[in-house]
Image (cartoon, rainbow, N blue to C red):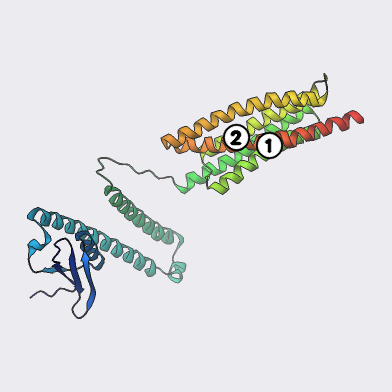
Amino acid sequence: MQLYKIVLGIDRLPSYDKYSIVVMNTSDILLRKEGLSKTEVLEIAQQYKVDAIAIDNIYELGTEQEIKNLVEQRNILKAKWEQEKNIINEIQKEKELIEKYKFEELKNLRYTEKVKIIHQVYLESKDKWKENFMYELSKLGKINRYSLEEVSPSLSIYFINKVFSVIIVSIILMSILVILIFRLPLPSLIVLSGATIDLIICLGFMGYSGIPLTLASFTALMIMVGLSLDTDMMLCIKILKIGEGNPKERAYEAMQTGFAMTTTTLAAFVALLVLGELTKINVYQQIGLIGTVGLIGDLIGTWLFNAVAVLYYKEKLAKS
């Protein structure tokens, strides 16, 4: 006689649409409930991982077709239990492998042996992750073909280093160009400070919103710096380089031109953001969002800070 560890007893209630159940092990009653649906009974069977089901009459579970469907669901649940059991066993094996090579033991091994052990653990963990990922994904529907790509840490480090190199070179070239145009330290500093304010606003928003530094977001940041330099240089040239009219009048004309430039570009970034939200394309979303926030910050920084600073400098220069 086979002895089952956990048994689920089922009895159909007089209403014929609900069940009362009891879950027992070899010595105790683990659970007793009444008024459950078939779905709830299956969930309890899954929760307690029962080994056998006891019932007065098999047809209390429904018609022949309903019983077949129930058996199929039971088989699916059983396969899932087996999968979970295998995963737990694999994790246990990983733990045993790591425990086998404790820190003190690893200290005594050569460097190449340490790397080999760690690399082996990494490969096994990665393969298990892929299997588990595809298993969960297959529940959503049939998958005919798939591919998984990896970005190695060395490539990521290379990309970040290149990004910082480009930023440093860009800052140096921009500074040289602005100084050559204005040939004065304070106007050059005002123009560069406008681009810096925009960059700080964009980076702060990226950090607050959790937007990572990717190729798309880096491109948006560089666009913001270029647009900010355009408006700031146009403002300074209008006020400082052109001698006709009153400086405040020239600043107002510069604001009309700059405001039209910025709002037109802002509309384009908003349209890109909307397109990204509709199509769920992450690149469009990142560029559109950073561009929108950056240009709003540019409007504030250029016309509430830089314009005031340039006018103050021009008036002080005129008095002296």
Residue type at the position of mark 1 = Ile
Check disc 2 and report the residue beneath it. 222
Counting every numbered tag in the picture gives 2
x and y percent of residue 99 in the render?
38, 69
Numbered circle sitting on residue 300 = 1
Q: CA distance from mark 2 to mark 1?
A: 19 Å
Q: Is the N terminus in the top left, top right, bottom left or bottom right quadrant?
A: bottom left
x and y percent of residue 66 in the render?
12, 55
Report the residue at 24% width, 65% height from top: 44
Numbered circle sitting on residue 142 = none
Report the residue at 53% width, 48% height from top: 210
The one of 315 and 154 positioned closer to us in this rendering: 315
Residue type at the position of mark 2 = Met
Q: Secondary structure at mark 2?
A: helix
x and y percent of residue 193 in the render?
72, 38
Q: Is residue 31 left or right of residue 180?
A: left
x and y percent of residue 290 in the render?
56, 38
Q: Is residue 230 left or right of residue 43?
A: right
* Mark 2 or mark 1: whose residue is earlier in sequence: 2
Residue 100, placed above or below residue 213? below
Crowding near the residue tagged with mark 1, few <14, some 14–19, many ≥20 C-alpha atoms within 10 Å: some
Q: Is residue 131 left or right of residue 163?
A: left
Residue 181, placed above or below residue 284? above
Q: In the orientation shown, which residue stands out farthest toward the bottom?
A: 27
The quadrant in which residue 293 appears is: top right
Q: In the orientation shown, which residue stands out farthest toward the front?
A: 15
The one of 110 and 82 positioned closer to us in this rendering: 82
Q: Secondary structure at mark 1?
A: helix
